[in-house]
Image (cartoon, rainbow, N blue to C red):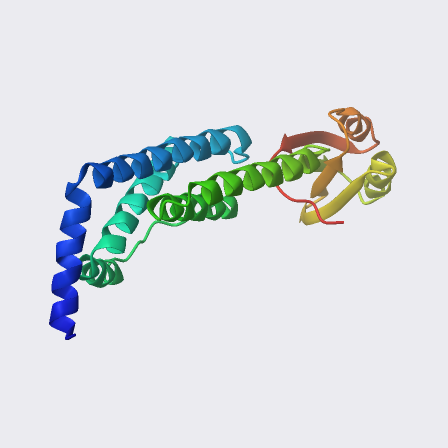
Amino acid sequence: MSVKDIIKKSILESFGSTNTTAGLVNIIIALAAALILGLIICLIYNKFYRGVVYNRSFAITLVGMSVMTAMVTLAISTNIVISLGMVGALSIVRYRTAIKEPLDLLYLFWAITTGITCGAQMYALALITALVMLLILIAFNRRSNSGHLYIVVVHYNDDASADFVRRAMGNMKYRIKSTAVRGNNTELAMEVYASNASMAFVEKLRDSEGVTDVSAIQYNGEYHS
């Protein structure tokens, strides 16, 4: 059988399979499953988002990515001509959108693989993967919520005050990020890890001798001791 006959047979089989009632039902089920799982991924992203500004457009993209990938998988799995065309078309597309949060790559790849598995009608695999990913996110989210991270900026007047600042910190975990000296004034920036929500260490720093003012900002970062 020649290549021309193989392509012709693939076209006839694909049109025959998609035009039957069973073929249409399979397509609807696959797209509906991709939509439902995409919505689940969007809700999980909304629940466990740890960034500063929530990106609603990215959340909607996760749903659309699942459905569109399922559609592409359905198309290329039934027609060899379309599959070759898809490869050629997608190979010339360049995406310039920068991913600022590394964890967003996980959600994006999760949405793509969910669409592929739904398009391949492997619904059990997609569902089990969603449950495993949910357990992973819950486990690491509990670990990350065990403490709070602050950027603390302390201004003091003389070098002797640096000793009082270190004593005020006590046994707390902290790292000095920068030190700026302007005349007799010194600005000290520290990354401080607090195991609870208490801000008592800020009061101790403020009451330290030589300290003029203290600023503390909580942010979502990672602390490595």
Quarter-wise, where is residue 68 in the image?
top left
Q: Residue 24 at x, y = what percent?
A: 21, 38
For residue 26, above or below residue 113:
above
In the displayed structure image, the side of residue 86 where residue 165 appears, left or right: right
For residue 126, above or below residue 39:
below
Along the viewing direction, whichever of 182 and 12 lies nearer the viewer? 12
Q: Please indicate, yes or no, whether residue 187 appears anywhere in the rendered image.
A: no
For residue 174, above or below residue 50:
below
Q: Residue 214 at x, y = what percent?
A: 70, 30
Q: Residue at x 46, y 48 (%)?
A: 105
Q: Residue at x 22, y 58 (%)?
A: 86
Along the viewing direction, whichever of 148 and 177 lies nearer the viewer? 148
In the displayed structure image, the side of residue 12 where residue 60 appears, left or right: right
Along the viewing direction, whichever of 204 and 93 lies nearer the viewer? 93
For residue 178, above or below residue 203:
below
Quarter-wise, where is residue 221 in the image?
top right
Q: Residue at x 23, y 50 (%)?
A: 75
Q: Residue 4 at x, y = what percent?
A: 11, 71
Q: Residue 11 at x, y = what percent?
A: 14, 57
Q: Residue at x 85, y 34 (%)?
A: 168
Q: Please indicate, yes or no, whether residue 218 appears anywhere in the rendered image.
A: yes
Question: What is the quadrant of the N terminus in the image?
Answer: bottom left
Quarter-wise, where is residue 187 in the image?
top right
In the displayed structure image, the side of residue 211 where residue 124 appears, left or right: left
Along the viewing direction, whichever of 28 and 5 lies nearer the viewer? 5
Label total for image: 0
- Single out the residue that lies furthest toward the bottom: 2
